[in-house]
Image: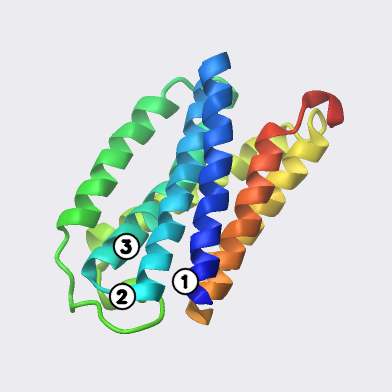
Amino acid sequence: METLLAFAAALVALRLSGRLAARWRVRRKPELALWAAGLGAYALAAAALAWGASAGWDDRAFRAYYLFGGLLTAALLGAGSLALVGHRLAVPAVLLYAGLAAGIAISEPLASPVTGEGIPAAQEHFDLFPARLAALLGNIAGTAAVVGVALASFRRRPLGNALLLAGVSVAAAGSALSGLGEARTAAFITVAALLLYAGFAVPAGRN
């Protein structure tokens, strides 16, 4: 069951990422590309979750889950929100961060091998610096950007921003409760991805 739910979460997030990417191809707005990348990273995190649930967690599944879920998703979504309000440095900054994050996730030595069932705890396998610190800063900055932009423009776009805030809350709850297992984490990913996509895509006239 855990594998099926995680795989379903990956498909949902990937489908929503594809819809945003299609909008970007038509409109060429950087925020759409960054939001699509953020949901795409969320989809890959869910795919790594399915990998760990089906075959047992190992170093490869853990590194993939940590990279896409722990390091990239929030940062990419936050950069999209900053790009929406005209912060031109958001794109090069997040690209630089993404390259650094990939290097950390791939090359940082693990304190102990990853084995067994259940989502591995990052503090048991990665040192605080640089891996866990990078994830902490990326998540704080990305979440603060999404929340800050949503609150600042709430009166102009109440429905879309309310959905975004709800999506961020669900995603944060899913991260905090990852110890409950793959199935529940996958459910949080699915709901958060749906809320975030709806917040990004809701037509202005519906607000």
Q: Residues within 10 Å of mark 1 (few under 14, many from 20)?
A: many
Residue 133, relative to residue 16: is it above or below? Answer: below
Q: Is residue 48 left or right of residue 78?
A: left
Q: Position of residue 161 (x, y in %)?
A: 73, 40
- Amino acid beneath label 1: Thr
Residue 95, relative to residue 55: is it above or below? Answer: above
Q: Is residue 130 left or right of residue 4?
A: left
Whether residue 168 is visible, yes or no, is: no
Callout in the foreground (2, 3): 2
Distance from label 3 to label 1 (Cα)? 26 Å
User: Residue at coordinates 80% horizontally, 28% vertically from top-left?
Assistant: 156
- Amino acid beneath label 2: Trp
Q: Position of residue 101 (x, y in %)?
A: 28, 48
The residue under label 1 is 3
The residue under label 2 is 57
Asked if disc 2 and disc 1 are in contact, CB closer than 8 Å, the reply is: no
Callout in the foreground (3, 1): 1
User: Residue at coordinates 14% horizontally, 65% vertically from top-left?
Assistant: 109
Whether residue 116 is visible, yes or no, is: yes
Q: Residues within 10 Å of mark 2 (few under 14, many from 20)?
A: many
Of mark 2 and mark 3, the one earlier in the sequence is 2
Of mark 3 and mark 1, the one earlier in the sequence is 1
Residue 111, relative to residue 32: is it above or below? Answer: below
